[in-house]
Amino acid sequence: MKFECHIYLSFQLPRLTLDFVVLSSSSSERYDMSGARLALTLCVTKAREGSKEDMDALERMFRYLKFESTMKSDPTAQQFLEELDNFQQIIDNWEEPVSCAFVVLMAHGEEGLLEGEDKKMVRLEDLFEVLNNKNCKALRGKPKVYIIQACRGEHRDLGEEMEGDQVAVIMKNKPQTIPTYTDALHIFSTVEGYLSYRHEQKGSGFIQTLTDVFINKKGSIIKLLEEITRRMADTEVIQEGKPRKVNPEFQSTLRKSLYLQ
C-alpha cells in the first residue's frame, strides 16, 4: 500500500511553465548517406569456431555497401575499449564528412558484458558510450549502428508450438543540442538472458542472415531487421541433438529512416 503525504504551505510559489521548442525541422526523413561510411569489427576468434566465416561475410557486406572497413581479431577486454577509442579519433579526424558508423562486436558474452581474448569482461555500455553524441563530434546526429554477436545469458529457447496454418517451415540449417544517446541502433544476436549460437563451419546464423539481407534486400534498416528477425524465427538450431530457437533483438533511438542502398 502506498501512502501519500500532502503538505499545504501558506505562501505561493511562482508558476513554472515548460515550453517545448522544435530545435530544427529537416525536410528529409532520411539520414544523409552521401558522406563516408566507416566500419569497425572486433572479433574474438579463439575458442569460437566459425567466427572466421562471419568475418568474411561481414567484409563482403561492407565492401558491397561501400564502407571503409577495419577488422581486428582477438582483442582483450581492454583492447575492446582502446580500439573503440582509436575508431572515434579516426572518425573525428576524417577528411570528409562522415555519414554513419558501424561497429560489430563478436565474442563470448553474458548479460551486458563481452569477454575479451584474455577472459576478462568489458561492459557493453562502456563501449556504446565511446561514439555517442557527447564523445564523437563527427557523428553527432549521425547513425551509429552496433551489431553484437554474443550470448546474453544462459537460457535456451525451446520455442512454442503454433496452431494450424501459423506453423512456419522449419529450416535445419544550426547550433543546437540533441540527446546524448540518440541516433543509435543496437542489434543483438539474441534477446537478453539467452544464449546465442554459432556453427563451427558455417558461422553464426545471425551474422550470415544479416549480411545476406543487408546485401540482397533494399529498404530502411528497420524493415531489414524485421526480415532478419522473421527468418531467424523460422529457423531451428540443433544443439546437443535438441532443437533450439534464437531470436535477434534491436533497440533504436534513430530519429530518421536509415537506408544503406
Image (cartoon, helix red, strand yellow):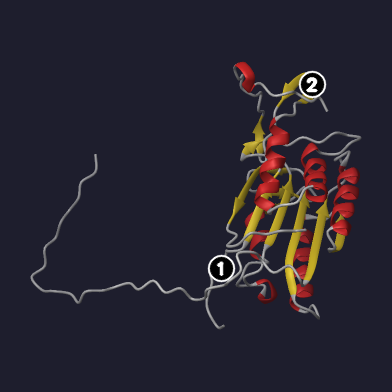
Residue 92 % position (x, y): 74, 77
**Residue depicted at 75% across the width and 51% down the height:** 218
Indicate whether 167 appears above or below 183: above
Count of labels shown? 2
Residue 259 % position (x, y): 71, 58
Residue wearing tag 1:
180
Indicate whether 191 appears above or below 28: above
Residue 78 % position (x, y): 76, 60
Q: Could you say which quadrant of the image residue 243 lies in?
A: top right
Q: Determine crowd level at label 1: few under 14, some 14-19, many 20+ residues with C-alpha closer than 10 A.
A: some
Look at the image and tell me in which quarter the N terminus lies.
Answer: top left
27 relative to 229 in the view: left or right: left
Residue 151 appears anywhere in the view: no
Residue 89 appears anywhere in the view: yes
Mark in front: 1 vs 2: 1
Which residue occupies the extreme left position in the image? Answer: 10
Q: Determine crowd level at label 2: few under 14, some 14-19, many 20+ residues with C-alpha closer than 10 A.
A: few
Which of 235/157 is in front? 235
Residue wearing tag 2:
240
Look at the image and tell me in which quarter the C terminus lies.
Answer: bottom right
Which of 32/43 is in front? 32
